[in-house]
Image (cartoon, rainbow, N blue to C red):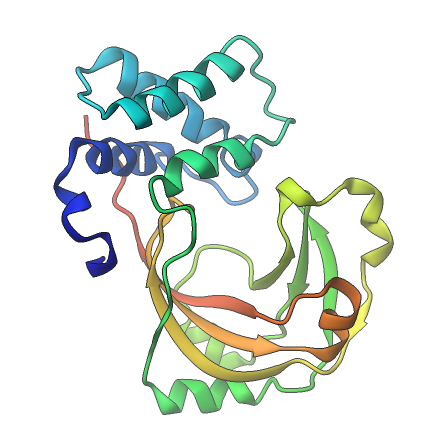
Amino acid sequence: MEQLGNYIFTSDFGYQENVRRLSVTGFGENDKFYYNGWSQLISMIQLYEKHQVNLSEELKLLVDNIINKYKENIDIDVNIRGDIKKFLMWPYPNYFNFSDYKNQKLLDLCKTMNNKIHLLKVVNGKLYLMVPLNQKLEKIRNNPESVHITVINSDKFQNHHNQYDDFEIDDVEYFKLSSTYSRDYPLFANVIVVNCKSEKIFEMFGKNELHFTIKVVLRKPYEF
C-alpha cells in the first residue's frame, strides 16, 4: 500500500476500491460474470450513476469511455477484462513490485513440489498450470480459488489453444515467497505468492516469471 502514497486519500482511489469491493459481493468460484469483468463494470455503473462521485477529469474520461462502450451490449460470455484492468490499475499501469516474504518453513514445504508433474489446463478461457499440492500445503493454504499458476490470461488467450490441455510440465522449481497489494484482482486485498520457474514454460510461451497464490487477505465486500 505504501507505493500508492497520497493517492489512497483521493476520491479516485475511493471509487476504485469501492468498485473492487462491490464486484466481489456474491462471488462464486468459476463465476463467468466475475472473471470476464462484467461484475466490475456493473459495480462501476452502480456507484457512478447512483452516488455522487467526484473524480479527476482523467479518471472520469476513462470511466465514461468504458461504461459507454459496454453498457448497451452486455454479454457475460465476452471477456472485457482488458478494459476493466485499465480502470483498476489507473493511474499506475504496471504491477507494484513484490516484496520478499520471509517464511523458510513455508518455502521448504513448497520446494517439496519441485520437478513434480504439473498439468497445463484451459480454465475459464485462461491457460493454467495446475499445482499438485501436498497435504500440508492444502491445510495451510488460504485461497478460495483453485490451485493454479496462470500462464496466459484470458484477455490474451483463445479457446483454440485447447491442445495444451493435460500437457505435462515436469521441471517446475519453487524458489521464493513474495507479497503485494492487489489492485487488478478485486477478490484479494493482499497476497502471498510462491515464485517458481520452468524452462519448458519459457521455451513454449516465453514466460520466465511464474507464481501461484498461496495465502490471501480477502477484500471486504461493499456495504450499502
**In which quarter of the view is residue 55 placed?**
top left
In the displayed structure image, the side of residue 137 where residue 5 appears, left or right: left
Q: Is residue 99 above or below residue 143?
A: below
Q: Horizontal and vertical percent for residue 19? A: 31, 32
Number of on-image labels: 0
Q: Residue furthest front?
A: 58
Q: Horizontal and vertical percent for residue 97? A: 37, 65
Q: Horizontal and vertical percent for residue 190? A: 31, 59
Q: Is residue 207 above or below residue 59?
A: below
Give the position of the C terminus as an image quadrant.
top left
Give the position of the N terminus as an image quadrant.
bottom left
Q: What residue is rendered at 82% in x and 66% in y?
A: 167
Q: What residue is rendered at 36% in x and 53% in y?
A: 182
In the displayed structure image, the side of residue 82 where residue 184 appears, left or right: left
**In which quarter of the view is residue 82 placed?**
top right
Q: Horizontal and vertical percent for residue 186? A: 38, 44
**In which quarter of the view is residue 45 placed?**
top left
Q: Residue furthest top?
A: 72
In the displayed structure image, the side of residue 110 where residue 23 appears, left or right: left
Q: Is residue 115 above or below residue 16?
A: below
Q: Is residue 146 or residue 162 the one in the foreground? A: 162
In the displayed structure image, the side of residue 38 where residue 151 appears, left or right: right
Q: What residue is rendered at 42% in x and 39% in y?
A: 27
Q: Is residue 107 above or below residue 43?
A: below
Q: What residue is rendered at 57% in x and 34% in y?
A: 32
